[in-house]
Amino acid sequence: MKMETSLTGIHETKYWHRLEDGRVQCDVCPRACKLQEGQRGFCFVRANQGGRIVLTTYGLSSGFCVDPIEKKPLSHFLPGTPVLSFGTAGCNLGCRFCQNWDMSKSREIATLADQASPEKIAEKARELGCRSVAFTYNDPVIFMEYAMDVADACRRREIKAVAVSAGYICPEPRREFYTHMDAANIDLKGFSEQFYSKICSGHLQNVLETLVYLKRETEVWFEITTLLIPGENDSDKELHAMSEWVVENLGVDVPWHFSAFHPDWKMRDHPDTPESTLTRARKIAMGHGVRYAYVGNVHDEEGDSTWCPQCGRRLIGRDWYRLTEWALTREGDCPDCGTRVPGVFEAEGPGDWGRRRLPVSMGGSC
């Protein structure tokens, strides 16, 4: 199929098929939205126009910002470097606790005020000294055509692409999408079908399949994030079960971030996550053999830092998103015992971007 884009944000897609009743089914994610002419899918940004599924937000963004890569969060991928981050609107999950609901739940295309072609984004990233571009704030799965084109433009300039995703995607588009990505952070939101169906309007198994796919069939560097919500997904039983699955299916070296929830969107009746819950989760994961477990959204230098799993030396010190110590050798080894730390590290050492957050304007035109 010829892929065409207009300045209105409309872009042809290929993961769909026509049904006998005249509707068109989107095949990007497990929701399998079946749409009449003019209807939009659950994600809001993919729609039936003219008897085919189109992406309606190609080239449009809710805003650009340079962040520390640790904010994605990625702790073993180009530490200390700046990443140009952006998202669009909509999402293919319905998480009641969404921490970025103003973008992911947006139903107003007019809020996508910034426009930029893939080439312009890649050039801006290079101009700003960013080592990577991240598709974040909402899930890039739903704007995969735009994300893949941006990733390709970045790759031509030796800039890496990062997908921050819930991993809710079908096998065929998943294979294509991740051939364009260098790194990912996948939200493993909980470890029960009840949690995913009740709280996220999705299914757990599809996310587990994405994680296994990334581990077994790609070279994409990936890390996991679990947002712990009091009374919902933070029980010892669930954390033990999740840890067992991670070690058995993904291995002991996958970095795992346990992040604190704050009341938002449709779960404002739940309290903030206590720091003790994050510490407990980290301890449980490490007890099952996970070597690199982290805490997030709280101030905990021990839980933020990277420690050698063999001799216990602190290898990368972190205070929020600022690096405070760097002891890795050029090869990425512990200098005391020689243990190799898995990740994507540059031989010349880490960046020094720190905690800065820099909003970026693309000038309003492609």
Image (tube, rainbow, N blue to C red):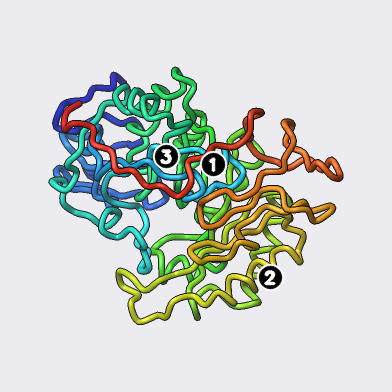
Label placed on residue 134? 3
What SS does tag 2 mark? helix
Label placed on residue 332? none
- Count of number-bearing discs: 3
Q: Label 1 sits on what residue type?
A: Gly
Q: Nearer the viewer, mark 3 or mark 1?
A: 1
**x, y (%) of residue 4?**
24, 22
**x, y (%) of residue 323?**
57, 48
Q: Nearer the viewer, mark 1 or mark 2?
A: 1
Q: Which residue is mark 1?
A: 80
Cα distance, mark 3 to mark 2?
31 Å
In this view, 70 is above or below 267:
above
Q: Label 2 sits on what residue type?
A: His
Q: Which residue is mark 2?
A: 240
**Residue visible at 68% across and 70% down in the picture:** 240
**Residue visible at 17% across and 41% down in the picture:** 113
| Image quarter (top left, top right, bottom left or bottom right) of the C terminus | top left
Picture quadrant where residue 61 is located: top left
**x, y (%) of residue 22?**
21, 41
Cα distance, mark 1 to mark 2?
32 Å
Position of 36 with respect to 335 (left or right) is: left
**Residue visible at 37% across and 41% down in the picture:** 66
Nearest to the observer: residue 288 or residue 195? 288
How crowded pointer 3 is (Cα within 10 Å; few <14, some 14-19, many 20+) is rated as many
Mark nearer the N terminus (3 vs 2): 3
Residue farthest right in this picture = 337
What SS does tag 3 mark? strand
**Residue visible at 42% across and 39% down in the picture:** 134
Q: Label 3 sits on what residue type?
A: Ala
Nearest to the observer: residue 357 or residue 259? 357
How crowded pointer 1 is (Cα within 10 Å; few <14, some 14-19, many 20+) is rated as many
